[in-house]
Amino acid sequence: MDESPGQSPGRRGNDRSYSRQGSGRRLPCRRRSTAQASPQLGDKEKLYVLLGQVGSGTFGKVYKASNTANGRMVALKLIKMESEKDGFPVTAMREVKLLQSLRHENVVQLYEMLVSKGSVYMVFEYMDHDLTGVLSQTQFEFSEAHLKSFCRQMLAGLAYLHHKGIIHRDIKGSNILVNNRGELKLADFGLARFYQKRRKSDYTNRVITQWYRPPELLLGATIYGPEVDMWSAGCIMLELFTKKPVFQGVDEIHQVHVVYKIFGTPSIEEWPGITSLPWFELLRSSEDIPNRFRELFKKWLTPAGLDLAERLLTYNPERRITALQAMDAPYFNQEEPFAAAPTGLSTLQGEWHEMETKREREKKRKRDEEGGVGGDQD
Ligand SMILES: Nc1ncnc2c1ncn2[C@@H]1O[C@H](COP(=O)(O)OP(=O)(O)OP(=O)(O)O)[C@@H](O)[C@H]1O
Ligand SMILES: [Mg+2]
């Protein structure tokens, strides 16, 4: 057994609290001699000036920084070491090793590792936005061709990973980065792992953030392959159009039912393997729910788009479309408009990461609450 199936992955759920640090995003790059007031990292050859925080995950904070030697923007992902008694954290080591073996236009590039004052950072190419952030803003409107391009770039990144024998296992909006040239790159390889292409191995099933987790994992499967990423890709494809996560379950049991409400209860004919999954009986639906997918989503997607989404969100993992097959779908190659990268994103004001989106949402919630109290008093 490669992992401990069924055990907690140590990072799940969709909520985290964020704080803002650093010296502000619009600081110009400074040379070492003039940068005394800004936080600095690195040695003589490589000096990074921190410009602000752009992300905060379970495993560490992510900062925007500039390399004063060449003016290039980078993202510095701090690796949390506190809880590590035995040296470098295993999960971070796995992420670094995987990333070092990858080079593709739709996978974020790890430039180097940096050790500064006892902290270890991964130095990445900087990406202006993530998908959660950029879909939440209303200033720049994406056309159908833009969304098709995002979808295709995501699939190209996944096809590359799967070809290299890697399952990502955490595809979601905040782990998909976008830059102002309209390029999309997969990021956050903290849960990714190499898989055996010929032999299906036994892995943990507590992977993939709940809303993007495929039905086989929700039903307890521990033997799986790259198909798990393809379900998440289907969720993202729909989210590109609806602008919010489609299957928002509050817990794992509810999650299964949220999916059933849209795609209907899975039949044994379409998915014979379902009966041997550990939690099949436990999560069996008492009623037969009809499939309402096309009826609900025809206002968002074109006919070829609906076909592709349906093939990504296929219950039976053996019948689910692969990334390579998906790139060949009529949606991309026959149906107009054809994909066009949203290069106009360079006109968008600000940078949109999940962190900003959460902060804005929090502000709005507070405003609404205050407004609500005022309203009551009136
Ligand atoms: N190269 C980058 N350029 C710009 N922003 C980035 C970059 N890498 C990460 N971020 C931002 O930081 C956030 C957290 O990064 P990442 O997902 O790699 O960390 P994590 O600690 O594994 O997060 P989580 O636990 O939230 O999945 C991302 O959602 C994204 O908004
Ligand atoms: Mg992440």
Image: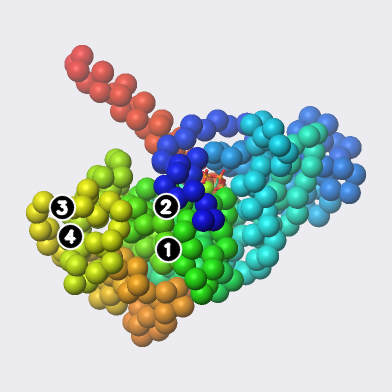
Question: At label 4, which amino acid type do we have?
Answer: Thr
Residue at 68%, 65% in the rendered image: 101
Classify residue 219 by image quadrant. bottom left
Residue 54 visible in the shown view: yes
CB of mark 3 near ligand 1 (< 8 Å): no
**Marks 3,4: beta carbons within 8 A:** yes
Kindly identify which residue carries mark 2.
Answer: 205
**Marks 1,2: beta carbons within 8 A:** yes
- What is the secondary structure assignment of the residue under circle 2? loop
Question: At label 3, which amino acid type do we have?
Answer: Ser
In the rendered view, tell whether residue 200 sits above or below residue 213.
below
Kindly identify which residue carries mark 4.
Answer: 265
Quick one: 112 or 137, which is closer to the camera?
112
Mark 4 or 2 closer to N-term?
2
Question: At label 2, which amino acid type do we have?
Answer: Asn
Distance between the alpha carbons at the discs numbered 1 and 2 = 9 Å
Front: mark 4 or 2:
2
Distance between the alpha carbons at the discs numbered 3 and 4 = 7 Å
Kindly identify which residue carries mark 1.
Answer: 224
Distance between the alpha carbons at the discs numbered 3 and 1 = 23 Å
Residue 132 visible in the shown view: no
CB of mark 1 near ligand 1 (< 8 Å): no
